[in-house]
Image (cartoon, grey):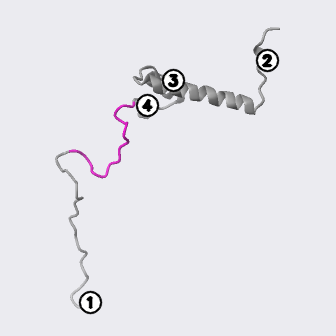
Amino acid sequence: MGIWGKKKNKKFSYQPRFYDDKGLGNPYEFKQKFDDYRVTIESDKGLKAKFKRALSDLKYNQNKEATRRMLIIVVVLVLIFLFIIDFDLSIFKRK
């Protein structure tokens, strides 16, 4: 306790070194690099709404090379999966 009562807590007025207080927002807010360009980042309720938003993002994507690369990766992964489960592709051939 002490002779003169309880000890008071110290108060600090901390301000970050590179903080610009001209209304640019919270300096502690973390933001992803490409959030401004994504339309799928909004939280939708339900699988159907998420799927529709992802398809519209894919449809109106300006980067066609990335879309083609994604489709190639998906096809290769599907073929690897079919190979692993030993899927017989001969059912698609005509007799």
Q: Earlier in the sequence, mark 3 or mark 2?
A: 3
- Which range is magenta? 24-38
The C terminus lies in quadrant: top right
The residue drawn where x is 45% and y is 32% is 44
Percent coordinates x, y for residue 53 in the rendering: 46, 25
Q: Is residue 87 left or right of residue 2?
A: right
The N terminus lies in quadrant: bottom left
The CA distance from mark 3 to mark 4 is 19 Å
Mainly helix, strand or loop, the magenta region?
loop
Q: Secondary structure at mark 2?
A: helix
Q: Are marks 4 and 1 in contact (CB under 8 Å)?
A: no
Quarter-of-image position of residue 31 = top left
- Local packing at callout 3 (Cα closer than 10 Å; few below 14, some 14-19, many 20+) is few
Can residue 33 be found in the magenta stretch?
Answer: yes
Q: Is residue 66 left or right of residue 74?
A: left
The CA distance from mark 1 to mark 3 is 74 Å
Can residue 51 be found in the magenta stretch?
Answer: no
Percent coordinates x, y for residue 10 in the rendering: 23, 74
Q: Earlier in the sequence, mark 4 or mark 1?
A: 1
In front: mark 1 or mark 3? Answer: 3
Q: Which residue is mark 1?
A: 2
Please, what is the three-letter code of the amino acid marked with disc 2? Ser
The CA distance from mark 3 to mark 2 is 28 Å
Q: Nearer the viewer, residue 75 or 22?
A: 75
Q: Which residue is mark 2?
A: 90
Please, what is the three-letter code of the amino acid marked with disc 1? Gly
Q: Is residue 93 visible?
A: yes
The residue drawn where x is 24% and y is 78% is 8
Q: Which residue is mark 4?
A: 40
Q: Is residue 53 visible?
A: no
Please, what is the three-letter code of the amino acid marked with disc 3? Arg
Numbered mark located on residue 68 in the image:
3
